[in-house]
């Protein structure tokens, strides 16, 4: 399917009941246990959850970065309606990864080559993917550094990564990621390694780029504050599954899943003075032997008999879904719909 044949609100990326496993000495780790997600054009989706919930594996699967001992066990990943899996899909995926879909990682130092000048590294992307000459690539690299807010870009191109601060290195990574004018940028904890002021600047840059380039962004983070500032929609992950999803503002105002409520209680709010943050008791389940029923039941204050059966994501409001037998919201919030299975 080509772009012109697509309607504007058709999703760019669809992840469909994706299961990813890792064959380890501890046993078969079920990293993703049936993840379904879609991202529309110009949309920013926040993917949140505790460590080990499956956020990075979801991104890696889209980028084709699941290596041994991991494998995609079942499900599908589609870009503009076409699968990226299987022999045909792999060929298609090679054409779009790094070009139409690009990724930024948490630690730029692991992605940048320390011995090559920054200009050489950005230029290499432009020469390889866009067939530019060295001279064209140099001019474009300078424009890209300027676009991500790096001053004196011509001089900076001749420097090595260690001559840049952490925030500036992340800007370089963003410049490389947008070099081929992608439609989707996946950012995996892009600000976690940075201090708070620099974090805010990088998030502001992402928001600006989204506006100016019409980018869709998947922002992976464990920080709900980051999502609130930047994202239209949010997907909350727990133990390899999405347990709540909806418009970001809506989910933050009316979290329905007890896990989302716990995450929100453990996030500091600017408009509230609190002595102490409440953390969620307990630890996530072992993904070698996940529980039969709801994966949150051992930690859930509302857990009951029904939770011995696994809940599916179900509509709780027209625009929001939760995987919980007893979704609840604060008394002042819009009443919930009777759960109806949607997948
Ligand atoms: N290479 C691997 N080998 C074995 N297990 C893996 C591998 N990569 C991921 N996993 C497992 O898959 C699950 C999901 O991991 P993932 O890295 O996606 O979590 P995450 O939510 O991104 O956490 P973090 O915030 O710590 O990055 C975890 O149980 C993890 O141990």
Image (tube, rainbow, N blue to C red):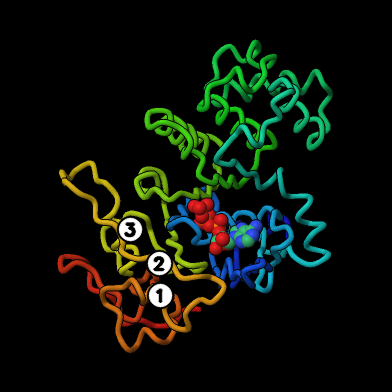
Which residue is denoted by mark 2 in the rendering?
244
Marks 1 and 3 sit apart, C-alpha to C-alpha, by 16 Å
Which residue is denoted by mark 3 in the rendering?
263
Q: Quadrant where the N terminus lies?
A: bottom right
Q: Nearer the viewer, residue 52 or 221?
A: 52
Marks 1 and 2 sit apart, C-alpha to C-alpha, by 6 Å
- Give left or right: position of 7 versus 137: left
Q: Residue at x 65, y 72 (%)?
A: 75
Quarter occupied by residue 341: bottom left
Q: Residue at x 44, y 83 (%)?
A: 293
**Is disc 2's CB within 8 Å of ligand 1?**
no
For the residues labelled 1 and 2, say whether their Cβ atoms are less than 8 Å apart. Answer: yes
- Give left or right: position of 22 versus 311: right
Q: Nearer the viewer, residue 324 or 79?
A: 324
SS at mark 3?
A: helix
Which residue is denoted by mark 1 in the rendering?
323
Task: Indicate the position of residue 156 as horizontal and vertical percent values.
Answer: 63, 15
**In this view, which residue lies farthest toward the front?**
25
> Of the residues under marks 3 and 2, which one precedes in the sequence?
2
């Amino acid at each position: 399917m080509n772009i012109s044949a697509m309607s504007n609100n058709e999703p760019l990326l669809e992840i469909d009941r994706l299961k990813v496993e890792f064959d380890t000495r501890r046993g078969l780790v079920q990293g993703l246990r049936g993840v379904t997600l879609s991202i529309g054009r110009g949309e920013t989706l926040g993917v949140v959850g505790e460590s080990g919930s499956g956020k990075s594996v979801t991104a890696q699967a889209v980028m084709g970065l699941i290596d041994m001992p991991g494998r995609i066990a079942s499900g599908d990943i589609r870009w503009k309606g076409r699968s990226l899996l299987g022999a045909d899909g792999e060929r298609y995926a090679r054409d779009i990864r790094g070009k139409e879909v690009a990724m930024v990682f948490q630690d730029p130092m692991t992605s940048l080559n320390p011995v090559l000048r920054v200009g050489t590294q950005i230029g290499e992307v432009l020469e390889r993917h866009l067939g530019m000459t060295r001279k064209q690539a140099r001019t474009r690299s300078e424009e890209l550094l300027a676009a991500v807010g790096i001053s004196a870009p011509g001089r900076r191109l001749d420097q090595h990564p260690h001559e840049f601060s952490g925030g500036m290195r992340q800007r370089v990574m963003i410049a490389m990621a947008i070099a081929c004018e992608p439609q989707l940028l996946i950012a995996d904890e892009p600000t976690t390694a940075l201090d708070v002021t620099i974090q805010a600047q990088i998030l502001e840059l992402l928001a600006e780029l989204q506006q100016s380039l019409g980018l869709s962004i998947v922002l992976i983070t464990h920080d709900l504050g980051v999502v609130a500032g930047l994202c239209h929609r949010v997907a909350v992950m727990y133990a390899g599954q999405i347990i709540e999803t909806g418009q970001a503002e809506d989910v933050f105002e009316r979290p329905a899943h007890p896990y989302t409520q716990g995450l929100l209680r453990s996030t500091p709010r600017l408009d509230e003075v609190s002595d102490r943050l409440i953390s969620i008791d307990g630890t996530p389940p072992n993904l070698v032997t996940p529980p039969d029923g709801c994966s949150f039941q051992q930690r859930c204050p509302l857990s009951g008999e029904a939770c011995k059966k696994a809940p599916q994501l179900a509509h709780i409001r027209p625009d929001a879904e939760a995987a919980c037998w007893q979704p609840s919201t604060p008394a002042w919030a819009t009443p919930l719909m009777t759960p109806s299975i949607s997948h």
